[in-house]
Amino acid sequence: MKPIKSKDLLELDKHLEVVKLQGYPIPEQVIWQAGKGDYSEVPIHKVKVPSHNECGEWIVEQLLANERGHWGPIEHPGITFSCSGFVHNVIVQARTHRIGTSWDVQSQRYTGKRVVKVAKKELDIEEVFYVRPAGFYTNRKGKKYEWTEEHRQRKLGRILSECEEYADYYEQGMCEEHIRDYLPQAIRQNFVVSFNLRSVLHFMDLRSKLDAQLEIQALCDSFAPELKLWAPNVWSYYEEKRLHKARLSP
Ligand SMILES: Cc1cc2nc3c(=O)[nH]c(=O)nc-3n(C[C@H](O)[C@H](O)[C@H](O)COP(=O)(O)OP(=O)(O)OC[C@H]3O[C@@H](n4cnc5c(N)ncnc54)[C@H](O)[C@@H]3O)c2cc1C
């Protein structure tokens, strides 16, 4: 049986979503300006900027190819994503990346009503909690097992009971910052994250490698098409030389 991959998760779980909110309009031009400015006699804003594609080709040839490693100019353009439906553990892992990243994560101190709605059957459990799709799984330690529909249903049942208890406490007037501690870890959280182009590629170095947790790989898989559209030349260099290759910074 073929093991479930991160891309399969995005097909099977329709609650996982990544939407680009904003990004520099022409990122490869500003990288060109920053890089060229390093050895321009005149201020770079006085120099005519080539087309996006010409800038991109220059970046790859002059800054990146042959391990030049001139990543500094690639830090200038920023991009912001809205990410929704990701399981709590993805957020915990993602927030370990501190440099060049900014995060705003949905707080469980203010969003307990969705759990109460699950308890009252006003919201589907799987809108609020993530339970892996049924299928065959492996992990980096070589475990191989089938996660059946029966396993899933048993887990969903347990989660529902936890939600019912949460709703009970909530309605007794207990505060969310207290009772959130007893929520199942499988809760989904939404977040907004901003990167610069270098930091998002660094994030992908570490989190789209094939032994990272599937769900965070799925987050990276969702960034990929946006990055390809946004900074096509840098992306194609990155995709060929680094993506999934576990080429890590020290
Ligand atoms: C597969 C995997 C499993 C992991 N498991 C765990 C785990 O079990 N528990 C856990 O706590 N974490 C875990 N981590 C997190 C990991 O230890 C790092 O904290 C995380 O990957 C962030 O690394 P970063 O290079 O993006 O850091 P950032 O803080 O974003 O830094 C970016 C870069 O800046 C440099 N840098 C930043 N700060 C320093 C510093 N203080 N000193 C020297 N150089 C610095 C480094 O070159 C670094 O790569 C895991 C990460 C991965 C990818």
Image (cartoon, rainbow, N blue to C red):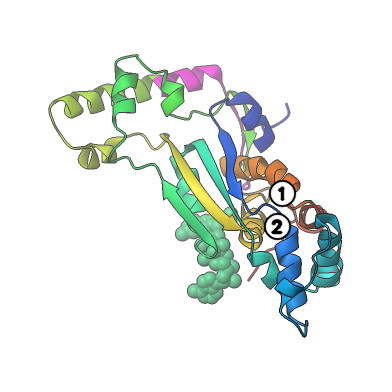
The spot of residue 46 in percent (x, y) is 74, 74
In the drawing, does residue 210 fall left or right of residue 162? right
For label 2, the crowd category at 10 Å Cα-Cα, with few meaning under 14, some 14 to 19 and many 20 or more, is: many
Q: What is the number of the mark on residue 18?
A: none
In the drawing, does residue 191 fall left or right of residue 14? left
User: Residue 153 magenta-drawn?
Assistant: yes
The spot of residue 26 in percent (x, y) is 71, 54
* Lower sequence index among marks 2 and 1: 2
The image quadrant that residue 234 belongs to is bottom right
The spot of residue 73 in percent (x, y) is 69, 70
The residue carrying mark 2 is 27
Q: Is residue 150 above or below residue 205?
A: above
Nearer the observer, 131 or 114 = 114
The image quadrant that residue 70 belongs to is bottom right
The residue carrying mark 1 is 230
Q: Residue furthest front?
A: 46
User: Residue 230 magenta-drawn?
Assistant: no
The spot of residue 123 in percent (x, y) is 38, 18
- Where are the magenta residues, as a range? 140-156
Q: In this rendering, does residue 194 appear at all?
A: yes
Q: In which quadrant of this rendering is ligand 1 seen?
A: bottom right
Nearer the observer, 159 or 114 = 114
Nearer the observer, 123 or 42 = 42
Q: Are marks 2 and 1 in contact (CB under 8 Å)?
A: yes
The image quadrant that residue 171 belongs to is top left
- The residues tagged by marks 2 and 1 sit, at their Cα atoms, a distance apart of 7 Å
Task: Find numbered disc 2 in the image and state the secondary structure of the residue it sits on.
Answer: helix
For label 1, the crowd category at 10 Å Cα-Cα, with few meaning under 14, some 14 to 19 and many 20 or more, is: many
Nearer the observer, 175 or 79 = 79
Q: Is mark 1 within 8 Å of ligand 1?
A: no
- Which residue occupies 21% across, 41% down? 178
Q: Amino acid at mark 2?
A: Pro
